[in-house]
Structures are given as structure tokens and as C-alpha cells.
Image (cartoon, helix red, strand yellow):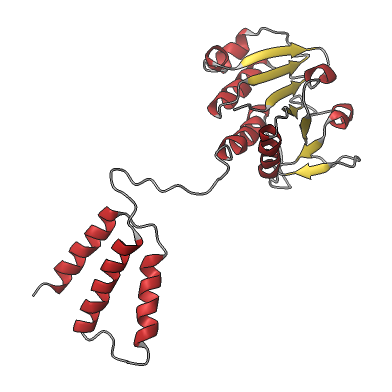
């Protein structure tokens, strides 16, 4: 799958570039573009700070201008925490990465711009972008270092790679219980409750049975868990 390019505009410290590379590879991104790094390139300090990311997959390309760095992109996003006097779509990181996936799936190339450590992106750079990413943070303290900002955006991209950020059930060596398996347990439990005079009101019994069926039916039970519940029920009802 094609990934977005991370584009650093006028970064200052090699250490920060290295930490950006590390954050990128954590999330499976490998296209790092650097525009006019203040301390030059290549950088020994970047290599040290990358924890091997620059050797294990992140590919760096340097450019003399933002225009050159984004020339092959169909859609670009500029990251900024400050409101700008420009009419542009503004995304959260989550929304921006959803849009990024849509465009990549349509065959488009996407670039994400990050400014230098001291002042961020200049208005001229933002003017070149298709849209803006603003990460909602504590309004009294929105300061992020460069690698943190890249990691937040890169993680959002990775989290949405399978088209969903829903939770996943880790079942180990067991399988998800079928509806029939769950209903067998529920019906057995209701029968045992009836035997032990739990349903004392005939009028309320249908509602109570429905509530119990709903209670066990709405969860992601596994075969092992249902088996354990059968064992619990047997222990509680043993004479």
C-alpha cells in the first residue's frame, strides 16, 4: 500500500529529524522529505537519534524548496496549531488521515507538511497546501515537538489502514461463541433460575427472561468463556 510522504520544512536539529524517522517507522511510513535542513544532510546526530530507522526502511530525500518537495503530490496537508487567514478545509488528525486513505485508494499521492521547530510552517508554505491539520490539544498549551506531531499523525494513518479503528477481540486459542452456544447457556440458566424460584412474578417473567437473553447476547463471548460459565452454573446448583 502507498503511504503518505512526511515533509519537514526547514528543520533545525538533526536529532529531531532522527526522532521523526523513528516515529515514522513505528507506524510503517518510510517516505521522508526534507526541505533545507539547517544543519545539512546527511547528519550523524540524526542517525543516532533514529534508533536505526534511517537504516531499516526510512528513505530520505532532500529538496531546496517546498514546491519541489510536493511537486508529485495530488493532495497536501499542512500541520499548524494557529489559525491562519486563509480559506482552507481544516481537519483533525483523525479526519485528515481518513481523507488521506480515501485519496490513496483512489491512486493519489499525499504529502503532509511539518514546519521547523521554532516557528512552524510559514504562511507561504501553508498557501501551497490543499488543506490544514490542526490537532485539538489543551488550548493553554499546544506545544508539541516535531517528532510528537509526526507520531500523532502517523499513528492515525496506521490505525485506519484496515479501514477501521474499532476494537479487536483477541481470543487466543478459543473461538467466538455462536449464537446457538450462547442461547444454550442462557436457556439452561433460565431453567435453573426457575427451579430455584427466581421468577416469583408471572407478569415480570417474560421481561426478566428477555433481559437475561439480551445481557448475554450482546457481548462477544468465546467458547471457553461459555464453557466456564456452564461450570460455574453446575457448581452453584450442585446438590
- Compared across the picture, whether 56 is left or right of 84 comes to left
Taking 228 as reference, is 8 left or right? right
Residue lying at 73% horizontally and 17% vertically, measured from the top left: 34
Residue 12 in view (yes/no): no
* Horizontal relation, residue 51 to residue 118: left or right: left
Residue shown at 69% from the left, 24% from the top: 5
Find residue 189 and report its horizontal and vertical position in percent.
Answer: 25, 73
Residue 146, quarter of the rendered image: top right
Q: Position of residue 20 (x, y in %)?
A: 63, 23
Q: Is residue 203 above or below residue 193?
A: below
Of residues 182 and 133, the one drawn nearer to the viewer in this rendering: 182
Which residue: 73% across, 47% down?
139
Q: Name the residue: 31% across, 63% down.
A: 180
Please name whichever residue, 69 or 106, is drawn nearer the observer in this view of the structure. Answer: 106
Task: From this view, report whether residue 82 is shown above or below residue 199.
Answer: above
For the N terminus, the image quarter is top right
Give how far across and how far down residue 111 sits, in percent. 73, 27
Q: Is residue 87 above or below residue 74?
A: below
Q: Is residue 48 visible?
A: yes
Residue 24 location (% of width, % of height): 60, 25
Q: Quadrant of residue 61?
A: top right
Amino acid at each position: 500500500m502507498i503511504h503518505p510522504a512526511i515533509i519537514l520544512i526547514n528543520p533545525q536539529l538533526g536529532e529531531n529529524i532522527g526522532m521523526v524517522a523513528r516515529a515514522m517507522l513505528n507506524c510503517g511510513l518510510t517516505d521522508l522529505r526534507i526541505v533545507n535542513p539547517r544543519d545539512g544532510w546527511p547528519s550523524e546526530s540524526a542517525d543516532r537519534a533514529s534508533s536505526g530507522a534511517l537504516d531499516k526502511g526510512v528513505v530520505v530525500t532532500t529538496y531546496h524548496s517546498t514546491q519541489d518537495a510536493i511537486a508529485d503530490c495530488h493532495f497536501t496537508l499542512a500541520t499548524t496549531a494557529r489559525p491562519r487567514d486563509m480559506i482552507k478545509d481544516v481537519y483533525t488528525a483523525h479526519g485528515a488521515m481518513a481523507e488521506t486513505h480515501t485519496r490513496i485508494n483512489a491512486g493519489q499521492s499525499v504529502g503532509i507538511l511539518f514546519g521547523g521547530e521554532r516557528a512552524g510552517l510559514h504562511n507561504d508554505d501553508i498557501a501551497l497546501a490543499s488543506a490544514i491539520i490542526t490537532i485539538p490539544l489543551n488550548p493553554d498549551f499546544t506545544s508539541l515537538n516535531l517528532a510528537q506531531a509526526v507520531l500523532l499523525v502517523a499513528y492515525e494513518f496506521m490505525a485506519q489502514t484496515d479501514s477501521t479503528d474499532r476494537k479487536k477481540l483477541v481470543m487466543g486459542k478459543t473461538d467466538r461463541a455462536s449464537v446457538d452456544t450462547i442461547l444454550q447457556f442462557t436457556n439452561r440458566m433460565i431453567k435453573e433460575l426457575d427451579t430455584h424460584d427466581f421468577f416469583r412474578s408471572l407478569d415480570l417473567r417474560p421481561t426478566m427472561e428477555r433481559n437475561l437473553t439480551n445481557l448475554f447476547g450482546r457481548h462477544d463471548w468465546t467458547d471457553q468463556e461459555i464453557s466456564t460459565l456452564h461450570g460455574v452454573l453446575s457448581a452453584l446448583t450442585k446438590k
